């Protein structure tokens, strides 16, 4: 005679909190507002700045706009690599580009989100205090790309 044992299937219990307990909400930053702070713009900027090459680009651009060829020379990187890093910064809203003939110039963009603006302003201030970088920036502008201070003639 065989004996059949039926096992009761129990449902898995949730881990962590009890099913009947209310969820705790994290407190807001100011403590008075029930809605959480919008941190997406800041997170986007911090992700983009999480790379040494992109931070170096920000350091150079903190002294004024530069052409891709200037950044190639300053960073000692290939044009595709510099362009890819600039694309990440542009997608994050940190830099903007403008075309002048065959040259594409990049410059820092003013930030609308207060925390993003404060973060970027802090970096720019620190980089601007480096006097040697400012002198190198001027030399770099004169070394390659279009002539500095000479208006282009459109045909």
Image: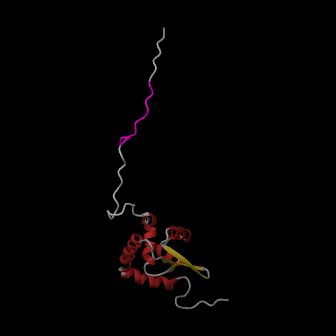
Instruction: Let me know if residue 64 is in the magenta part.
Output: no
Q: Quadrant of residue 117?
A: bottom left
Instruction: Let me know if residue 12 is in the magenta part.
Output: yes
Residue 16 shows up from this direction: no
Q: Is residue 14 above or below residue 108?
A: above
Name the spot of residue 144 as percent of width and height, x first.
53, 82
Name the spot of residue 47 as percent of width and height, x first.
44, 63
Q: Is residue 133 above or below residue 14?
A: below
Name the spot of residue 28 as percent of width and height, x first.
35, 61
- Pick whichever, 24 or 7, lies toward us: 24
Q: Is residue 64 left or right of residue 132?
A: right
Q: Is residue 79 above or below residue 25?
A: below
Count every numbered label the image shows and give the total.
0
Residue at 42% over, 75% down: 59
Residue at 49% over, 68% down: 92
Residue at 46% over, 13% down: 3
By secondary structure, the bulk of the magenta-drawn segment is best described as: loop
Magenta residues, as a range? 8-20
Q: Quadrant of residue 20?
A: top left
Q: Is residue 106 left or right of residue 59?
A: right
- Pick whichever, 130 or 118, lies toward us: 118
Residue 44 shows up from this direction: yes
Q: Is residue 73 left or right of residue 99?
A: left
Q: Quadrant of the C terminus?
A: bottom right
Residue sticking out furthest to the left: 31
Name the spot of residue 120 as percent of width and height, x first.
41, 73
């Amino acid at each position: 005679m065989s004996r059949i044992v039926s096992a009761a299937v129990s449902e898995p219990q949730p881990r962590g909190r009890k099913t009947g307990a209310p969820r705790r909400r994290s407190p807001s930053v100011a403590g008075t507002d029930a809605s959480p702070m919008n941190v997406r713009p800041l997170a986007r900027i911090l992700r983009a700045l999480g790379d040494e090459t992109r931070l170096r680009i920000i350091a150079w651009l903190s002294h004024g706009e530069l052409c891709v060829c200037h950044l190639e020379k300053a960073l000692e990187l290939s044009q595709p690599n510099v362009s890819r890093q600039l694309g990440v910064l542009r997608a994050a809203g940190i830099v903007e580009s403008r075309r002048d003939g065959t040259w594409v110039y990049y410059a820092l963009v003013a930030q609308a989100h207060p925390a993003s603006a404060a973060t970027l302003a802090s970096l720019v201030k620190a980089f601007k205090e480096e006097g040697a970088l400012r002198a190198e920036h001027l030399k770099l502008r004169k070394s390659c790309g279009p002539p500095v201070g000479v208006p282009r003639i459109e045909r």
